[in-house]
Amino acid sequence: MKCLLTLFFCFVCLRNAKSQYPFNMSEYLQMPPLYQLDDYDACLHYSNKPTKTYCVVYAEIVPDPFSKAWQRVEHFSVDFMQRYRHDRLFMGVCVERCESVWHGFNISQRQVFNSGPTDDAALKEYYDNVHIRSTKERQQYEVILNVCLNYEFQQKYQLQIKTNIEYCQSSDEAIDKDALDYTLYFIFLSIALFSVMSTIYDSQLKAKAATEKQQFFYETELTSTAQRYLTSFSVCRNFKRLTASPTGKTANDLKFLNFARVIPEFVIIFGHTAGYFMSVQVSNTEFVENFIHYEKTSFLENYTAVIVQIFFIMSSFLLTLLFNKRNPITPNSGFKECVKAYFKIFIYRYLRLVPTLALVLLFNATLMPRLHNGPFWRHLTEAERIFCRQNWWKNIFFVNNLTMDKSCTQHSWYISADTQLFAIFLFVLIFNARYPKMKKIIYTLLLISAIAIPAFIVYHKNIDPIMRINPEIYRYMFFKGVKTFYEIHIPFYTHLGAYILGIITAEIYMKLQNHMQSKSYRGVWWTELCWLTLFITLISFPFVGVNLTNKSSLWLGLYAGLYKNVWALFCCLILISTCYKLGGILYDLLSSSILQPLANISYQAFLWHVLALHLLLSYYRQPMYLNTPILVYFVILSLLITNLIAFFMTIFVEYPSTEIVNCLCRKSKDNFGRRNNKSPVTSHQD
């Protein structure tokens, strides 16, 4: 089913890509290609020199108003919000070739062709911070490569270029193993040993159990804390947890939320895959520019802005249900009791999130750079290696969305934002439980803030209200031109609306729950029609393209304040109406048991999907040709690999660590969040 949905979204997204962006293709092809790469393997492995070196160089074309070649480049680069800057190039250079050119010049010729470093000092500083391993080579070959490449570029295009070496790779270079590497190897070995021993022990317990209990032994929770510890890594038990059907009235009512966890994950992976193609070397860059033409892909930009609202709504919805089910605070609770409940709940959630997140950081810092090689491998992965070593604390303490500079695993900004919102609204729930008369006032203030904060930020800073798809952003892996991303897309305070609406929806659900059981509207034509109208409106909402160009700051601020919140409101209306089992065959599809395992691995899929993209796309030696079938193929392949990795990480890491945390908290009678493993809504959002 996921593959069919993938094909549908890709078709809708790309069917218009064939219609050309209005430009002269013959002139376009006369421009210098954005990526020019020497043969990587021939340079490093098939040369007679003892030590061979391959460098990736960033180049800027020097403007020449009298040159037709420059006029062509300038014309095609002026709309850099929808096109590449064709005066910014990446070149892969075999140093041995350029040394031959260098030695063929005398001193005066070298001076003539030495155009100096690039003007983008910030990018140079960024590369200096990331590619620490190449500091010596950059100093050694900077001038040689500048002279060589400038000479060749002038011969072909009659234009000058300034260059800056991003990094160099030597044939005999290897990454030295350190304590972090051995720590990761030790963890993997320990997980393997624990899994084998725990599985054997669990099978022995099953053999000793009564005959009538053996059939459902792995589905049954053990009563002994010691046995739960010892079977936490049991592969058989964890596999049953992954595939088990939900039990309980509320769990069955909310089975459709599995769809809401799986489909946004798919959309995110689809969007990141499409964006990743803007980061790698592509030969036919006109395809990418056609693809991101605003009028063709406004829906993708809109979905990028709103899709995570579904996760925030589910997070707050489930938080409210669990909080009211446990009921840890009453109007008679004291201050110490409130503080104790707050930290107990928050720490429990923190301990459930951290183990697999820490493993991702450790993997990116150690093993991932060793998995492949190629001209662009370090361009796309070295920042992860360096920043995960230097700034891991940003992710572990869930603040990387507030300090994205030099942070790793950037897509985990959502987890940090969700944790921050969880911390804030957990306080709100405790306060409301202690002072119930203040609830309406607090909710009103929060709803006003949810609209006012993003509106004020956009109006005051005069930025786009949604993150535009810009190829230049992806070329530098979100290093350049990301003001909207930093200011609007990732801070927790721009997502208050989804969270507070999720809480209100949960309270409405709890009040109507008895009515839902006694009164059925399923099959009634007017209720089904209302549900279908809501559903179509919800999925069509982002397809309504709004031209944000040359709009006033006041209008953009109003748009920023309302757009995501209106989408979130429609999501909540759909959520409540679906609780009444409206939707006919669509409800049956949303509640399908096939989605249960996919929903259970969605957290791991989100964490590890960027690794799948690195493995699929970062090792190519030459610029790759891109078209619609190839993009569809890679989207499907990335989904398959992502979910395969997520399956193993859920079985071997997430479930064991969660069970250990549950055992640690078991002695507390009011333990919040101890989950029924068969619940369809148990994930990191709990």
Image (cartoon, rainbow, N blue to C red):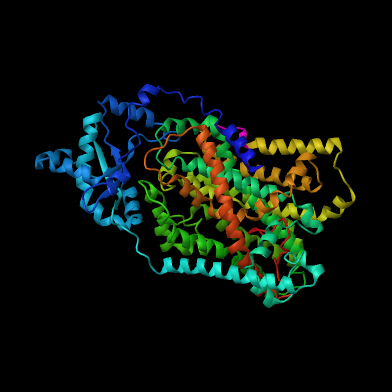
- Residue 615 visible in the picture: yes
In the image, is 523 to the left or to the right of 306? right
Magenta stretch prevailing secondary structure: loop
In the image, is 275 to the left or to the right of 506? left
> Is residue 543 part of the magenta span, yes or no?
yes
**Residue 551 position (above or below residue 173):** above
> Which residue lies at the image location 58% right of the left edge and 58% below the top edge?
648
Place of residue 21 in the rendered image (x, y in percent of width and height, measured from the top left): 47, 26
Place of residue 620 in the rendered image (x, y in percent of width and height, measured from the top left): 40, 43
> Which residue lies at the image location 39% right of the left edge and 40% below the top edge?
281
Please count the marks in the image: 0
In the image, is 629 to the left or to the right of 282? right
Q: Nearer the viewer, residue 561 or 666?
A: 666
* Quadrant where the image shows the N terminus: top right
* Quadrant where the image shows the C terminus: bottom right
Q: Which residues are magenta?
A: 542-546
Q: Which residue extends farthest right? A: 518
Q: Nearer the viewer, residue 588 or 78?
A: 588
> Which residue lies at the image location 46% right of the left edge and 49% below the top edge?
614
Place of residue 218 in the rendered image (x, y in percent of width and height, measured from the top left): 72, 65
> Which residue lies at the image location 74% right of the left edge and 74% below the top edge?
208
> Is residue 419 part of the magenta span, yes or no?
no
**Residue 116 position (above or below residue 244):** above
In the image, is 177 to the left or to the right of 350? left
Q: Nearer the viewer, residue 406 or 166?
A: 166
Quadrant hosting residue 577: top right
- Residue 462 visible in the picture: no
Place of residue 160 in the rendered image (x, y in percent of width and height, measured from the top left): 23, 35
